[in-house]
Amino acid sequence: MRDLRISVTDRCNFRCTYCMPREVFDSSYRFLPHEAILSFEEIARLARVFVGLGVQKIRLTGGEPLVRRDLHRLVSMLKELPAELTLTTNGSLLVKQAHELKKAGLDRVTVSLDSLDDATFRAMNDADFPVARVIGGIEAAAAAGLGPVKINMVVKRGVNDQGMVQMAERWRLSGHIIRFIEYMDVGSTNGWRMDDVVPSAEVIERISGHWPLEAIDPNYPGEVAERWRYADGAGEVGVISSVTQAFCSSCTRMRLSTEGALYTCLFAQTGHDLKRLLRGGASDDALRNEIAAVWQKRTDKYSEVRTAETAKERKVEMSYIGG
Ligand code: SAM
């Protein structure tokens, strides 16, 4: 166990069509009530137990983590722990919050940006949010000292794949790292089909056609992104191939949902309730034993056994479990 992803909210101000489609997450959708959500104090206590069990890296996510009020308060609580602290965000609120987050102790951010073409991006986020404001957020993060920024682009065939090369060109020489993510069958609301996936091998081939790329070693065992660098020294890109090259066997991640359930896989159907223990007065030792037992018993390898049939199974939504 090396990485912990903590979902701090199931809400988001975007409605990305592949993640929180507006038809499902509309005004009648019932998000978690306030009392169901872990408090910052509860999250920090659990995080301390996880770090005691070997976690070295904590990522705050959601939903959109920056819509949770006063997130910087949680950051300052987690900063006390001997672990790297990062955050994944759609970037929409970074201009306002980057400086405060850095001051509170955040180490780095990853920003999602699926296209540089404004019409394509506005259609994908389905919130009519412009590219320029996300780029402003990336620049604010870098200026605040939260760089190098990783930029996540989910690639969906026929939707935004024609913009991959432009995206690579935009971030070459910037010091930031663009990562191309294979579109996944997370949750059960996005209508995923294998035909929509652009394999990472094709991404590398298409970019290499413009600027040759060479593979480089992972930063650490179990790193999710495969790393490539431009042969001309212009920087690095990453690909995340959870569909075509599953990495279950080296997975070191645990996920804590917004309401305190523990998930051993992004594609899980059920979680393990830690909130009940936490609010029932369990000691740190009891929490540690429970988490260790869940970890030791995990058998998940969904991405290795994925088929068109498994893709239809009911899985937990990414906005709830944390991306
Ligand atoms: N709201 C934040 C954001 O936009 O980055 C954090 C949560 S979001 C669920 C985390 C990441 O998951 C984003 O980079 C998003 O693009 C990615 N994601 C969501 N649904 C996906 C899918 N079906 N396949 C691949 N990546 C997905």
Image: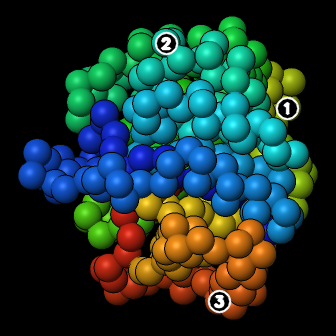
Tell me the kind of residue under disc 3.
Answer: Thr
Q: Is residue 225 visible?
A: no
At mark 3, the secondary structure is loop
Q: Residue 293 or 44: which is nearer the viewer?
A: 44
Residue under numbered circle 2: 96
Which of the 4 quarters of the picture holds residue 173?
top right
**At x 67% / y 60%, what residue is drawn?**
46
Tell me the kind of residue under disc 1.
Answer: Ala
In the depicted structure, whether residue 14 falls above or below residue 3: above
Spot the residue most to the front: 281
**At x 33% / y 29%, what residue is drawn?**
121
Q: Nearer the viewer, mark 2 or mark 1?
A: 2
Q: Earlier in the sequence, mark 2 or mark 1?
A: 2
Residue 269, x across and y down, in percent? 42, 80
Residue 231, which numbered label? 1
Residue 139, which numbered label? none
Residue 154, x across and y down, in percent? 47, 45
**Side of 170 where 217 appears, left or right:** right
Residue 322, x across and y down, in percent? 49, 55
Residue under numbered circle 3: 299
- In 3D space, how far apart are the residues under numbered discs 3 and 1 (Cα atoms)? 39 Å
Q: Residue 290 or 297: which is nearer the viewer?
A: 290
Q: Earlier in the sequence, mark 3 or mark 1?
A: 1
Tell me the kind of residue under disc 2.
Answer: Lys
At mark 1, the secondary structure is loop
At mark 2, the secondary structure is helix
Q: Is residue 289 visible?
A: yes
Q: Are marks 3 and 1 in contact (CB under 8 Å)?
A: no
**At x 62% / y 16%, what residue is drawn?**
100
In the depicted structure, whether residue 166 falls above or below residue 194: above
Residue 247, x across and y down, in percent? 69, 70
Q: How many residues crowd mark 2 within 10 Å: few (<14), some (14–19), many (20+)?
A: few
